[in-house]
Each structure stands twice: as structure tokens, then as C-alpha cells.
Amino acid sequence: METRYYVVVRLDGDYAWLRRTDKQEQDLVNVARALLPEETDEGTHLKYEMLQYEVI
């Protein structure tokens, strides 16, 4: 499984919009906030690996 890096662009209710930072992609990814660490806020950098998000 590939490791991916994201930044939280926007929090919208129970969802967060993430932008990938390790590749040039314009599309945002919509993720349920329940899958993210509790301390996640706008501007937080995340690592996605082994089906889990981690604040970096």
C-alpha cells in the first residue's frame, strides 16, 4: 500500500476536504472526520499509510 501525504484544506461538518501534497493533483479528497485523528484542524498535515491517517 502506498504512503500518501495530505493537508486539510477545509472542514465541513462531519467531513474534511484534503489536498494531496506529495503529487501534483488539483482534486480534493472528501474524508469522514471520524477517520482522522481528533486534533485534526484546517491546515493540519497528514500521512495516510496502512489505512490510517496520522498527524505529521
Image: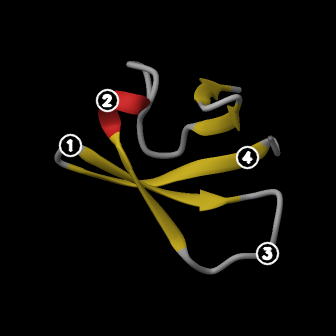
Residue 42 lies, in percent from the top left, at: 43, 45
Q: Are marks 3 and 2 in contact (CB under 8 Å)?
A: no
What separation in Å lies between label 4 and label 3 (alpha carbons)?
11 Å
Q: Residue at the location (82% across, 57% down)?
A: 22
Please say if the residues under marks 2 and 1 sit with CB atoms less than 8 Å apart.
yes
Q: Quadrant of the C terminus?
A: top right
Q: Quadrant of residue 38?
A: top left
Q: In this view, does 19 lie above or below 2?
A: below
What amino acid is labelled 1 in the image? Answer: Asp
Figure check: 10 above or below 28? above
Report the amino acid beneath label 2: Ala
First in sequence: mark 3 vs mark 2:
3
Q: Position of residue 39 (x, y in %)?
A: 43, 20
Task: Judge from the rendering whether residue 40 lies leftward or rightward of residue 4; answer left or right.
Answer: left
The residue where tag 2 is placed is 34
Q: Name the residue under label 4.
A: 5
Task: Give whichever of discs 3 and 1 has the lower sequence position.
Answer: 1
Question: Label 1, on which residue?
Answer: 14
> Label 1 near label 4: C-beta < 8 Å?
no
Please give the residue where the numbered disc 3 appears in the rendered image: 24
Q: Which of marks 2 and 1 is nearer the N terminus?
A: 1
